[in-house]
Amino acid sequence: METTDFAKYLAKFFTEYLVGERGSSTNTIRSYSNTFTHLLVFMDEKEHIKADALLLDHFDRNVILRFLDWLQTSKRCGNATRNQRLAVLHSFFKYMQYEDVKRMARWQEILSIKVKRQEKKSVNYLTVEAIKFLLKQIPTGNRTGRRNLALIALMYNSGARVQEIIDLSPSSLRIDKPSCITLHGKGNKKRIVPLQNKQVALLRAYMEENALDKPANNQRPLFANNRGGRLTNAGIAYILNMYTDMARKLKPELIPRISPHTLRHSKAMHLLQAGVNLVYIRDMLGHVSIQTTEIYARADSKQKREALESAYVNIIPNTGAQGSWEKDSKLKTWLKSLSK
């Protein structure tokens, strides 16, 4: 079977551009692959063109718009997912501008498709009291419970993304002082996060129990499933939900419904409330821009109120209590009449 031009350029885009030129991470490759898988399904089901017959000529602005609409209607994707898929396609067609200059006008029409406005969600986080109560629900009388305590405590204390925790191996940890953990974030960007003594003690005991402190095992998953493989996003969400459900039954007002990412939000908020500079929080979380980290400052209404109160200067002259409107019976009568 002859390879189509679309298949040829798509393969080059993944192997030569994303992997070879950009050095994209496994997670980025997986995300891009998912988008094109959805596109192939759409072209088959709605445009009636099989994957092995797809040509570059089959793609234009209208086709991509129909695909994005299909994502939101048939797949019930929100604006955020729709925009993420569009960003992947934009990346591909930007690449095609240089690979297929004869159809540059067509690729630029696709690139002109705008993202949809996303409603900004409030930051969902737990209080320090809630974090402590959640961790108390994890039993430590068996090996699985001790693993889960080390896992969830590290997710909170390091502010790591779920995938960053999944990718950890014993070699990522420095147990000796100064203790720290090396995380590999988006775009394979590496950052080093210091660890507190209690967290180090917890990890040390966990690693010794599972022989993860042995040099021969330093490339094994730090947190493994029952088969010895790495935990998945769904697996970590299941573990966390198991204990949050337990905690919510006891204190529903303290523990809302959360996701693993909530632990990362919680750590950032607690650092901000403790007076840590946003720049340091940005570096710990691995944000590219300080603007991303500023969502925590905007979300913390208590800190904003306290900052405004501390900066308040009374500029109103003291006219005495005798001039109070509350003692003016005629004024009070007139105000009451307005509500009739």
Image: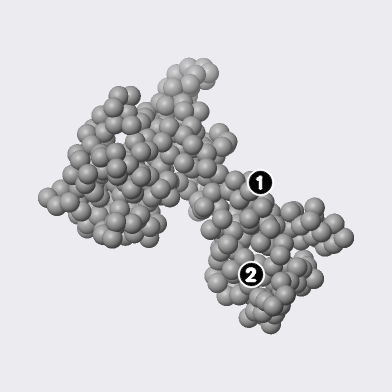
Secondary element type, mark 2: helix
Q: Residue at x 56, y 37 (%)?
A: 288
**In-image side of 123 versus 151 (left or right):** right
Q: 21 or 215: which is nearer to us? A: 215
| Residue 203 badge | none
Q: How many residues crowd around disc 2 within 10 Å: few (fewer than 14), some, or many (20 or more)?
A: many
Q: Residue at x 58, y 48 (%)?
A: 24
Q: Earlier in the sequence, mark 1 or mark 2?
A: 1
Query: Percent x, y for residue 297?
Result: 48, 35
Q: Residue at x 22, y 44 (%)?
A: 211
Q: Amino acid at mark 2?
A: Leu
Quadrant in the picture for residue 10:
bottom right
In this rendering, the answer to whether 185 lies above or below 28 is: above
In this rendering, the answer to whether 106 lies above or below 3 is: above
Residue identified by numbered label 1: 21
Q: 258 or 213: which is nearer to us? A: 213
Colour option used:
one colour
Q: 58 or 14: which is nearer to us? A: 14
Q: CA distance from mark 1 to mark 2?
A: 24 Å
Residue identified by numbered label 2: 39
**In-image side of 140 versus 235 (left or right):** left
Quadrant of the snapshot with the N terminus: bottom right
**In-image side of 254 versus 64 (left or right):** left
Query: Percent x, y for residue 171?
Result: 35, 38
**In-image side of 298 versus 39 (left or right):** left
Q: Amino acid at mark 1?
A: Glu
Secondary element type, mark 1: helix
Q: Residue at x 30, y 44 (%)?
A: 217
Q: Residue furthest left?
A: 141
Q: Residue furthest right?
A: 102
